[in-house]
Amino acid sequence: MESKRKRNLPYSFEQGPVRPPAEAESLLLRLTRNCPWNQCSFCPLYKNETFSIRALEHIIRDIETAYKTINAIKNACEESARLTQGVVDRMATSIPFVERPLFYAVLHWYSAGMKSIFFQDADSLIMKPADVIEILNLINRYFPEVERITSFARTHTLCNISDENLKTYAELGLNRIHSGLETGSDNILQLVKKGCTKEMQVAAGKKVKNAGIELSECVLLGIGGKNLTEAHAIETAGVINQINPPIIRFLTLVPPRGVELFSKTRPDAFIPATETDIAHEIKRFLENLDGITSYVESHNIVNLHQEVEGVMPGDREKMIGVLTTFLNLSDEERMVYQVGKRLGMFSRLSDVKDPGKFDIAKATCTQYGIHQDNVDMVIREVMQNYMS
């Protein structure tokens, strides 16, 4: 089956369209293209794209060329005392055109300290274990100073990797996996065509942890819409309680245009959750976490409540306090905060009590005809434009 997914393309350095925010300084190493599942009804990212596995020899060439490029950069630094733009330009023009994108990627990585490598795209561990092991061995050979190697992985794929292979990956330096849990509700998982069950999610999460790999689980806020927000919060907390992942990441669902979940022709029309719904959802989720020691983060730019951050259980009340403060605002204050935060006028919730900042954000609402009845629709459109 895997051989049918391989595409015999000429070599070129490739980088996929997405990475977690935490991998901004990583060298992005593309093992696979797009997503092997590609049926989630909320995700537009890889639609109309074909999944394929890059040729192992191309990945090896990426790594070996990156090593040579790092040495060339180090030599240039020694000869010129510092790496000026002129030195960079001369180096780039001396490199074959096909390898220039790799040069600039490696230069960025070198500038960031060469501490981490991220495997792309959506599910790179679907590769043959022998190939993953060869890639990890090669990274260890050429870049022994790398501190973290990370990959996305689907629940279904993790369930199909043997415990022995996962432990081998960990021993060779694969020490973090980002997994899109999204929700712990079987009902919602089926509605959004996630391709797994919560039982599989728990099994996959425990496998990763037992292998000694750090697990980062993504919870997709609003994925149950207005009607299933309570089930989403409570059942997702139930799954997380069984896994106790080191990291829980919040990501707010931005309704992309044209994806199946938001089709108006669906008999079970999806009604997007409001920002107030989502605040209640996060609060309910945090209240139902039990016996875990996870770090909770909400850094993504699409999240309204980026201040919700801390380590369970000690920071639970602090995080819930942020949400309670938001929910206790007047309707007008919540509206103004939503607009002000999304447009960069506010950096944190307390800014809504700053008269100067509040008046500017309120004037913006008036100028553009934003009121309490349409603010969530306007914000969705703003975020859609941002994400498109």
Image (tube, rainbow, N blue to C red):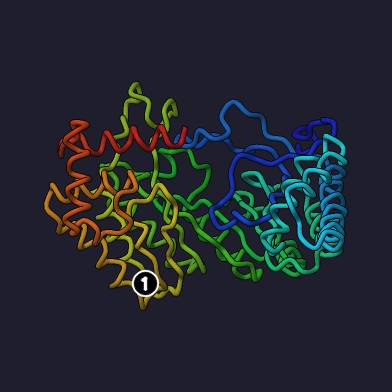
Q: Residue at x 56, y 58 (%)?
A: 22
Query: Where residue 339 appears, x then y in whole percent?
Result: 26, 44
Does residue 105 lie above or below 174 as drawn?
A: above
Does residue 373 lie above or below 188 as drawn?
A: above
In this view, the residue farthest toward the bottom is 314
Does residue 298 lie above or below 261 as drawn?
A: below
Q: Nearer the viewer, residue 276 or 198?
A: 276
Could you say which quadrant of the image residue 207 lies in? Answer: bottom right
Q: Quadrant of the N terminus?
A: top right
Could you say which quadrant of the image residue 73 lies in? Answer: bottom right
Q: Nearer the viewer, residue 141 or 271?
A: 141
Q: Residue at x 27, y 47 (%)?
A: 340
Q: Residue at x 72, y 35 (%)?
A: 52
The residue to which callout 1 is attached is 290
Query: Where residue 24 appears, x then y in whole percent?
Result: 59, 54
Query: Where residue 309 appears, x then y in whole percent?
Result: 39, 66
Three-letter amino acid code of the residue under disc 1:
Asp
Does residue 370 lie above or below 103 as drawn?
A: above
Q: Secondary structure at mark 1?
A: loop
Query: Where residue 351 appears, x then y in whole percent?
Result: 24, 58
**Mark 1: few, some, or many residues within 10 Å (few <14, many ≥20)?**
some
Q: Nearer the viewer, residue 367 or 160?
A: 367
Total number of numbered labels? 1
Q: Residue at x 80, y 68 (%)?
A: 144
Q: Nearer the viewer, residue 146 or 336?
A: 336
